[in-house]
Amino acid sequence: MITAQVIYATITGNNEDIADIITERFEDRGIDVNQTEISQADASVFLECDICVVCPYTYDEGALPEEGLDFYDDLQELNLSGKLYGVAGSGDTYYEEFFNVAVDKFEQAFQKAGATKATESVKINLEPDQVDIEALDEFTDDLILAAQKQAAE
């Protein structure tokens, strides 16, 4: 059975909503999924699953979630070769060039850990609307398809 882990960081609740949408889609598709808030998670949890997802927020002018800094550092030290990843997060376009840069930084951390990008990242302005939900469903479906393809090889 394909397994997934969704880790999220949130201040406003928007990224928890994003994580909930992704987790629900995984469940609807029969994927064994766990969802954890970043301060309660250890990056090594990604060693035990097929699909790794992070839903971070970007604080102020490009800062990572403070409660997730250790997680971010530890993630880069793992060997996640053979693991698939996706990153989706909420931000605020008010911050212009710093909009959702935490999504990019977590992508780079996954790449450093040797994980394989299985879908395009999703960047959402504030809370997810219907168009964003559809994008998150596609994001999740892409991850599942990649995992199924990998399992068949």
Image (cartoon, helix red, strand yellow):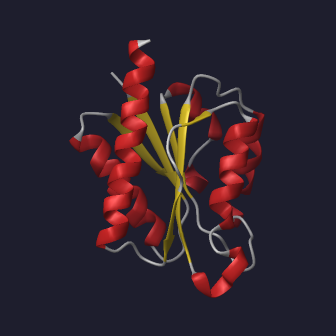
Q: Can residue 68 be seen in the rendering of this structure? A: no
Question: In percent of the image, x 37 and y 38: which residue is there?
Answer: 33
Q: Is residue 134 left or right of residue 120?
A: left
Q: Is residue 137 left or right of residue 60?
A: left
Question: In percent of the image, x 34 and y 42: which residue is there?
Answer: 141
Q: 3 above or below 74? A: above
Residue placed furthest toward the top? 153
Which image quarter is the C terminus in? top left
Count of numbered marks? 0
Point out residue 147 in the picture as x, y percentages from the top left corner: 42, 28
Q: Is residue 32 left or right of residue 58?
A: left
Which one is nearer the viewer's eye here, 5 or 122?
Answer: 122
Q: 113 above or below 7? A: above
Point out residue 76 in the picture as x, y percentages from the top left corner: 75, 40
Q: Can residue 113 be seen in the rendering of this structure? A: yes
Point out residue 67 in the picture as x, y percentages from the top left corner: 67, 62
Which image quarter is the N terminus in? top left
Point out residue 145 in the picture as x, y percentages from the top left corner: 37, 32
Which one is nearer the viewer's eye here, 54 or 35?
Answer: 54
Question: In percent of the image, x 58 and y 61: which residue is there?
Answer: 56
Q: Is residue 42 left or right of residue 62?
A: left
Residue placed furthest toward the bottom? 94
Question: In percent of the image, x 64 and y 75: which residue is there?
Answer: 99
